Image (cartoon, rainbow, N blue to C red):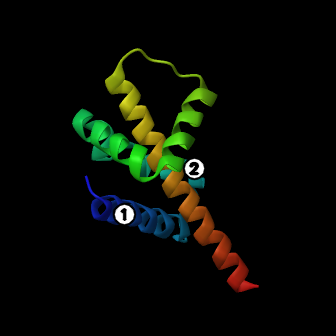
Amino acid sequence: MNVTEYTETLETLIKYAHWEYKREDNTQDLQDLVHEIVDGHAWLIYTKQSWDFVSFVRFADSFEYEEAQSMLNDIGEHTSDLDTLMSQMAYWIMFNIVYGAVQERLEAQEEDAK
């Protein structure tokens, strides 16, 4: 994994989540929508990709890594299976980034509309 792949993939997910949330017929909660978009991503479901993604984020974006660790601690899910842990970490990293970015875009649009 490299910075370009990381940035482009997450930006694509953010744009899609924002677009999907803004659709007129969408009645989903933003958290549910982001969960659905992120949950099936290859970085979560393929063990090697989860490890690569989490390892990359640990050094390239330590804030997001620490936030994901905090989320896992807060929800109290503990596993002795490292592959499962990497998948959970990858989920929370992706969820937090996509959800946060979409929220920021929505807030900015509300401010612009005022």
How far, Cα to Cα, is label 1 from label 2? 21 Å
Q: Position of residue 95 (x, y in %)?
A: 49, 48
Query: Residue 108 location in percent, x, y?
Result: 65, 76
Q: Secondary structure at mark 2?
A: helix
Residue pictured at 44% horizontal, 36% vertical: 89
- Is 82 located above or below residue 10 in the figure? above
Tell me, for residue 7, which label it has, or none.
Answer: 1
Residue drawn 64% across and 78% down? 109
> Quadrant where the C terminus lies?
bottom right
Do the residues bearing badges 1 and 2 touch, measured as CB atoms within 8 Å? no
- Quick check: 12 left or right of 18? left
* Residue 91 falls in image quadrant: top left
Residue type, label 2: Gln
Q: Work out whether residue 23 or residue 99 is closer to the camera in this orientation and state it.
A: 99
Q: Residue at x 50, y 54 (%)?
A: 97
Tell me the kind of residue under disc 1: Thr
Task: Work out whether residue 108 can be spotted.
Answer: yes
- Image disc number at residue 73: none
Q: Residue furthest right?
A: 114
* Neighbourhood count class around disc 1 (C-alpha, 10 Å): few under 14, some 14–19, many 20 upward: few
Query: Residue at label 2?
Result: 31
User: Which is more toward the observer, 9 or 18?
Assistant: 9
Image vertical order of residue 25 relative to residue 74, above or below? below
Residue mark closest to the camera, 1 vs 2: 1
**Residue visible at 32% across and 26% down?**
83
Q: Of the residues under marks 1 and 2, which one precedes in the sequence? A: 1
